[in-house]
Image (cartoon, rainbow, N blue to C red):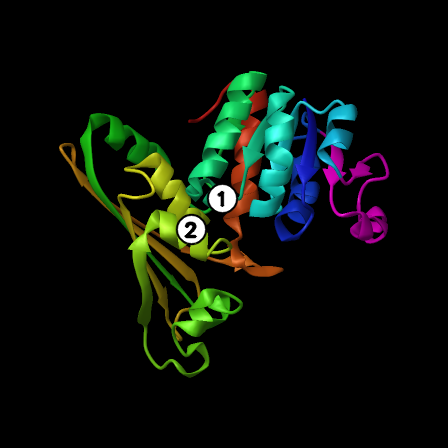
Amino acid sequence: MKTAIIGCGAIGQRLCELVPQLVPEVGLAVVAERQEAHAALRERLDSRVLLVSSPDALIEAGVTLAIECAGHAALRGYGPTLLRRGIDLMVVSVGALADAPTETLLHRAAVDGGSKIRIPSGAAGGLDVLTSARLAGLESVAYRCVKPPAAWQGTPAQTMVALESLSESTVFYSASAREAARLFPQNANFAASVALAGVGFDNTTVELCADPKATRNTHSVHAKGVFGDIAFQINGISLATNAKTSLLTPYSVVRMLMNLCRPVALA
């Protein structure tokens, strides 16, 4: 398996460390990043890793799997081209699929190229049981995200609530998962994953909350259906290099890589 990483920010850099250590059978051969970042990356990456800056260069390198962790624009820029050429794509920026034209474009490209779009769970636990519940008969799914005010800096939350002066936990946004994922692309990947596993973007309700007493990111999911009730909560720690990203996100990618290339896979 000749593998590429698209984007070498906080998640991509961590994957460059983890994949050779934990899944050495995966050949991490190429990193795609903006040309201006190549010089700095060259000092940190294994000398055998090829640096490129376009989807055509990834194709020419002969990769069979690309891991996108560069954001919505990069997914739209790289994804369709790679999928049409038969290259499987692992999508970390799953919130981009809340945009229906983007989801349709990627799906059609995968069908045309005979390739697969793979979505790791990221910070979202419980997706296996939620998907099973959907098959059994899922009626409603509600998701609530609580983070420290600092984790909402640089997002539209700044115009919705006075983050610097909060004294108590405050819900500043309630909407569907589709709207939440569009408006908060760096914070709502969890909501998007829950929506895809459950009742869809338009029928999944989302509450976003800033809590000055919070020290971790708390994700709560409640689902109901003919099978009964599901409730789970994750109190996660962010990556040291990015407060908006769960520490677990790169490990979920590693887990999916293990499932793809090892004889025993835990679904």
> x, y percentage for residue 217?
42, 60
| Residue toward you, 117 or 130 | 117
The answer to the question of whether label 1 and label 2 lie on touching residues, with beta carbons closer than 8 A, is yes
The residue sitting at the front extreme is 101
Quarter of the picture containing the C terminus is top left
| Residue toward you, 230 or 69 | 69
**Residue for badge 1:** 96
- Compared with residue 131, is residue 84 higher up or lower down, i.e. above or below? above
- The answer to whether 234 appears left or right of 96 in the picture is left
| Residue toward you, 21 or 180 | 180
Magenta residues (range)? 28-53
- The amino acid pointed to by label 2 is Ala
Q: Is residue 209 visible?
A: yes
- The amino acid pointed to by label 1 is Ala
Give the secondary structure at mark 1.
helix
Crowd class of label 1 (few under 14; some 14 to 19; many from 20; radius 10 Å): many
**Residue for badge 2:** 181
Which quadrant holds residue 202?
top left
> x, y percentage for residue 33?
74, 45
